[in-house]
Image: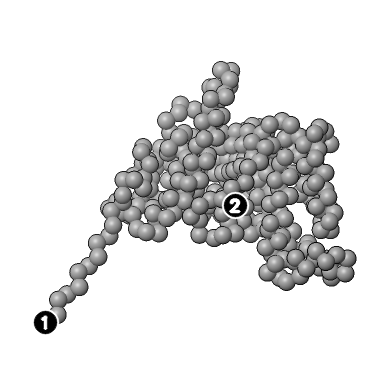
Amino acid sequence: MKNKAKATPTAAPALSDIRPGQSIELLKELHILTRDGKLNQDSRRKLKQVYHLYQFIEKLLLEVQADRSPQRSAEGITLADHGAGKSYLGFIIYDLFFKALPVGHIYGIETRLELVKRSQELAARLEFKRMSFLNLSVADAASSDQIGDNIDIVTALHACDTATDDAIAFGLAKHARFMVLVPCCQAEVARALNQSKALSLSRTPLAELWRHPLHTRELGSQITNVLRCLYLEACGYQVTVTELVGWEHSLKNELIIARQTGHRKRAAADRLRAILEEFGLTSLLETRFRLPTDATT
């Protein structure tokens, strides 16, 4: 008689996987933990990804907190999360950082109404009273009267295509101290490169870099992020580009962190213009990259 195979038990969450002070109930509500407190391999990977990004954001939150003047200390830190989706990031930031503070607010901005309602209901259940979820596009958020004139930190995790550019425009309009961007699915530049491909191939051998459709897409994505970094520098931000380790999609793990310095760089503006001219993209100066006129260095 054959022995019956033993069932493999569901792994319990390792304490080392969950940060101290993290609400177990929140992780259950986000379906990272099962109702009986188990953590499967997919959920463990998701949690590690969010925590990895949180490590970067936590440092910025602490810096804003340390630099806050006594006159503004009562206002609290504000953070706007664009393309919030199910708001994994926003909820974990609130739970680990904002919940312990007497003031401060997180805005989750999302176009899908069902996700906004779900997040509103979850925040109410958990009594996360200083979280707001707004059914707005990134572009419309800048003019919304539901958001204040100043936001300390702007995040945009996988805001698709030009939504990342809209998040940058929002951050500039709101005088953001920091912007944390993980771009996704950049297609606008690739479309522009494709439209002028024949002319470019006759004009310069560099057009071979985007002759094939796959290369057009990849180069368009690369150029887009380079332009974004130069634009942020031209607008008075110091930019750091790094990689989110362990994320699944290689084209979606570039992390851009912009720190406001107030020193607008003319050299960055000049280089941005030169790249746009080289690739036949100068029309973007009127739509995406409206450069300041008072850059100084």
Decide if residue 228 is in sight here: yes
Q: Which residue is drawn at 39% across and 56% down?
A: 43
- The C terminus: image quadrant: top right
User: Where, by quadrant of the figure, is residue 2 drawn?
Assistant: bottom left
- The mark that comes first in sequence, 2 or 1, is 1
Give the number of the disc on residue 1. Answer: 1
- The N terminus: image quadrant: bottom left
Q: What residue type is labelled 1?
A: Met
Q: Residue at x 81, y 32 (%)?
A: 296
Q: Which residue is drawn at 51% across and 31% down?
A: 62
| For residue 18, side relative to residue 255 (left or right) | left
In the depicted structure, whether residue 40 falls above or below residue 164: below
Q: Residue at x 44, y 54 (%)?
A: 46
Nearer the observer, 130 or 191: 191
Q: Which residue lies furthest to the bottom in this view?
A: 1
Looking at the rendered structure, the number of numbered marks drawn on it comes to 2
Nearer the observer, 268 or 79: 268
Q: What residue does disc 2 label?
A: 254
Q: Where is residue 154 in the image (x, y as percent from the top left)?
A: 60, 40
Alpha carbons under labels 2 and 1: distance apart: 56 Å
Q: What residue type is labelled 2?
A: Glu
Nearer the observer, 63 or 163: 63
